[in-house]
Amino acid sequence: MTVSVIVPVRDGARYLAELLDAARAQEPDEILVIDSGSRDGSVEIARAGGARVIEIDPQDFAHGRTRNFAAEQATGDVLAFLTQDATPAPGWLAAHLAALELDPRVGVSFGPHLPRPDTSPMIARELTEFFASFAPDGEPALQGPGDEPFLSNVNACYRRACWEEIRFRDVAYSEDQAFGRDALAAGWLKVYAPGAGVLHAHDYGPVEFARRYFDEYRGLRETTGHLEPVAPRESLSYVKVQVAGDRRWLAEQGVGGIDAARWTARSVVHHGGRRVFSALGSRADRLPPAVRGAISLEGRTDGAGGDHDAVAVEAPPEPTGRVIPPKHDAHPLDATLRVLRDGPAPLLPAAPETAERDRLRIAIVIPHFREGSGGHRTICTLVRGLEARGHVCSLWLHDPAGIHQAEADSVVRAHVDEWFGPVAAPVYKGFEHWHGADVVVATGWQTVHPALLLDQVRARAYLVQDHEPEFYATSADRLFAEDTYHRGFYVIAASPWLRDLVRSRYGADGTAFELGVDHEIYGMDPGVPRRDDTIVFYGRGATPRRATELGWLALSELRRRRDVRVVAYGDSAPNWEQPFPYEFLGVVAPTELASLYRRATAGLVLSLTNYSLIPQEMMACGLPVVDLRGGCSEAMFGENGPVELANADPVAIADALERLLDDQAEWDRRSAAGLSWAAERTWDAAVDAVEQGLRESLRVRAR
């Protein structure tokens, strides 16, 4: 493997010659220095030390952006990053290369920061103990998903393929920490290589250290969402423990007397200041710009999430009404407002070969959910199929209304696995830990605008399971839902009818898939006797497009004519009081549904928009189904196909059900046609079509 050593520099003359000599002695293929306006002779030192030098304007420098630029200019298969004050120890490069070879999935290695001889005891102890914790036995340590994401570009070595997939975030600070988290989330491994050490220590005075911690923890908040707690009692205990550790270290190094007392006092100031200014740094957005700039070692005036300074306005002399306190940090449609006001986040370049990778990183944004949600069940079924094909998936819950606010992350994950089937993908509440993707997938109109705000994405796709504007009467929600089809997402629609609708009405490009059947659950069982009097009704009243009231009126008419057994399910509680007795099952597990379908006489499932998954699961169990004539149901099943279609009239629906109860030949014909139709629908075929749609979204983006 060829190696490029990359060193961003600005006024780094103090250690630069030493660094270049030590790096050159380890025989990399090139040394690249990116200088951003040095005035101390660093450029001349770098050229004299054999480095290739690229000079950039100081205004163009940013930790993530500049390192991405440097990697693009470098030629090596391996990108070894150093800071301008990190001198490689003997064996540094060999240890990194050995670490990268430990496993094909290793994308990055990092090594220890060794204190210089004049390093203060607090920093020397902290560096030594901190890095020793990664490998207590002194051997290289592999780290994967769930491990500590720590990474430091003071001393890190990247496999180019890993950098090309992840790239550094364009952030002002902690781009390395963000890369560590993103790489692990994407399925890469990293290695701590204890033999790949560099001499390095920031040894500022007490005030400078405090200001540095302010910047450092502000960067952690920006990139990882870390919020340092404010806890005076715990902070006092922390300082006591750290000072005791420094005194022990001093004793082990043979430092005593006045020197020990002086360093003890310095230790108290150091650790106390760290506690205070790290908490301030993670709350930088709450401070006035002048205060932020004064505290920051880099002089930055922006806050942790950017500069959100409010414009002062003169308050009215007296309010005319009751003040209502906010219930949330932002309006539930805040993402919609931000997109309409500021536009979407820019997309990363998408080269043609990206679409052909064996493994894509796919981030799926989902709305809030509850037990029995058919749309989420379809999403998780598709995710399992994509994961089986080697893709790395993640689920991101967009829940601005706070439906899941009181639920721990583990509870949300447990509900996903229990209600919709287990997936390997991590489930995130919100976007605090967003780490980018090849394709981000919106799965409902409420998720489109949040997906448009996500950065580090190469393409956007829209899993359209229904024509959602029809869920609403004339309203703002209907307008917002319609807007989502104009946002440039590549549509992957859950029927050819739905694809053609969004294409003709909104001009959205896309493809289609057909819903599958889990044939291991839904199928015939000749040994199970079938009743001749049972109607199974999908009566999900919480979903208006299911036309529940129309179905209940039809069943009431049927009961007026004859004695039939009605079994309803789909809601967590009964949603309609009927003038006749019926059985209510609530939300039912798939295996129980299959057992019910094998014993019933006819199924009633009404769909006013896109066709439903449920009829084909009924048909796979040999159960004839009644649905509504026209629209997608007729487009999918045909006028006289496997499903008995009826006009949207309770009397006509009752007539259709009665035909299936009385006419055995018609029942047999519909049952056989349904079995044949369902047999051709598989989730493997659906996943194949969705996978091709995701790849096509990247191809369209590349074109």
Image (tube, rainbow, N blue to C red):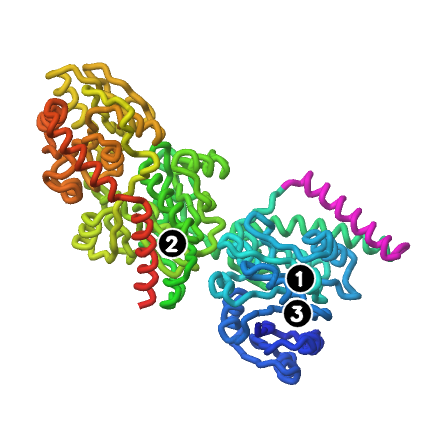
Q: Quadrant of the C terminus?
A: bottom left
Which numbered disc covers residue 111?
1
Can I make out residue 341 in this image? no
Residue type (three-letter) at the residue carrying disc 2: Val
Q: Is residue 502 left or right of residue 38?
A: left
**Label 3 neighbourhood size at 10 Å, few (<14), some (14-19), many (20+)?**
many
Q: Quadrant of residue 547?
A: top left
User: What is the C-alpha distance between the residues marked 1 and 2?
Assistant: 33 Å
Can I make out residue 592 in this image? yes
Residue that label 2 marks: 440
Residue drawn where x is 13% and y is 26% of the image: 660
Which numbered disc covers residue 678?
none
- Give 685 or 655, whichever is nearer the viewer: 685
Residue drawn where x is 50% and y is 68% of the image: 68
Image location of residue 339, percent across then percent down: 34, 54
Which numbered disc covers residue 93?
3
Q: Is residue 165 left or right of residue 43?
A: left
Q: Quadrant of residue 659?
A: top left
In front: mark 1 or mark 3?
A: 3
Q: Is residue 244 left or right of residue 431?
A: right
User: What is the C-alpha distance between the residues marked 2 and 3?
Assistant: 37 Å
Q: Secondary structure at mark 1?
A: loop
Residue type (three-letter) at the residue carrying disc 1: Gly
Image location of residue 606, percent across then percent down: 19, 33
Q: Secondary structure at mark 2?
A: strand
Image location of residue 424, percent across then percent down: 46, 45
Q: Quadrant of the N terminus?
A: bottom right
Residue drawn where x is 68% and y is 58% of the image: 209
Q: Which residues are magenta?
A: 231-258
In front: mark 2 or mark 3?
A: 3
Q: Quadrant of residue 508?
A: bottom left
